[in-house]
Image: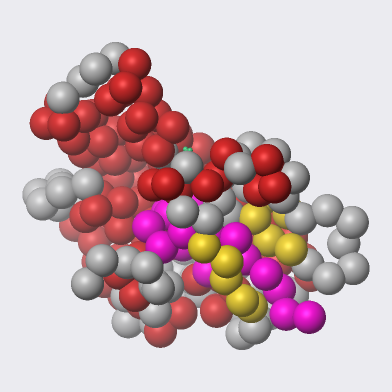
Amino acid sequence: MALQLYGFWRSLAAYRVRAALKLKGLPFVEHSVNLLAGEQHDPAYLKINPQGAVPALVVDGLSRPLFQSMAILDYLDHAHPTPALMPADPVDRSRVLALAHLCASDGHPLVVPRVRNYLQNTLQLDEATRNTWLQHFTMQALLAYERALSLDPRPGAYSHGDQVTVADLCLASQVVGAKLFGCTDFSGTPQVMSIFNALMKLDALQSSLPQNQPGAPK
Ligand SMILES: N[C@@H](CCC(=O)N[C@@H](CS)C(=O)NCC(=O)O)C(=O)O
């Protein structure tokens, strides 16, 4: 059976995995877990991803579904090495992972639904204040990414040369989030946006965008 991705149209973490599956040419079916309706908390789904979040990936022959987007990307890159999403050299790998985690581990967790819901329901922050939070932390990650690129540049279209890496998948998801949250001023992140625009020319990344998924508002 094909790989089964549990995702949601607007999920930034699921976007990374969806795009990676397409880059690697791996057929998959996607099941939508409606995060806005709270389906991530369903007991049946918690057996798939105990964290109550997307993505999760069901792979035939494995005893457990995989979860956590970075761990799924790591699995995919080892199980299906071509095209590689990570460089082989240890220093290059470290650079790529540092860029990736800037977004995936430090930027993105501050804007996920559980945080947004806490800001809204428990701290009673109004929508404008919540949006300020989302935009602030999203742009902080992109500004840090921009500084990292400036300090340690590489020639090529993407974050680490002309090969798409996990850093690019995380950069793309972070910019997609920025746009979803209403950020409009990207003048401080020209290299980030140049890479993003190059990535958007790839069908795997373009067709994986939230607005191109079933269930997305027209
Ligand atoms: N670090 C996790 C993050 C997973 C995550 O938080 N996903 C969000 C959607 S982008 C989610 O499902 N959130 C559910 C919630 O916060 O209730 C990963 O990379 O997979």
Visible residue check, residue 88: no
Q: Magenta segment range? A: 1-18
Residue 15 painted magenta: yes
Q: Residue at x 40, y 38 (%)?
A: 113
What is the quadrant of residue 151 in the picture? top left
- Residue lying furthest top in this view? 123
Residue 148: x and y, percent? 37, 44
Query: Relative to the observer, which residue lies in front, 86 or 53?
Result: 53
Residue 188: x and y, percent? 15, 47
Residue 194: x and y, percent? 25, 66
Residue 51: x and y, percent? 64, 37
Q: Is residue 120 above or below residue 28?
A: above
Query: Relative to the observer, which residue lies in front, 148 or 31?
Result: 31
Query: Relative to the observer, which residue lies in front, 147 or 193?
Result: 193
Q: Residue at x 90, y 68 (%)?
A: 61
Visible residue check, residue 50: yes
Pick the quarter of the image with the N terminus: bottom right
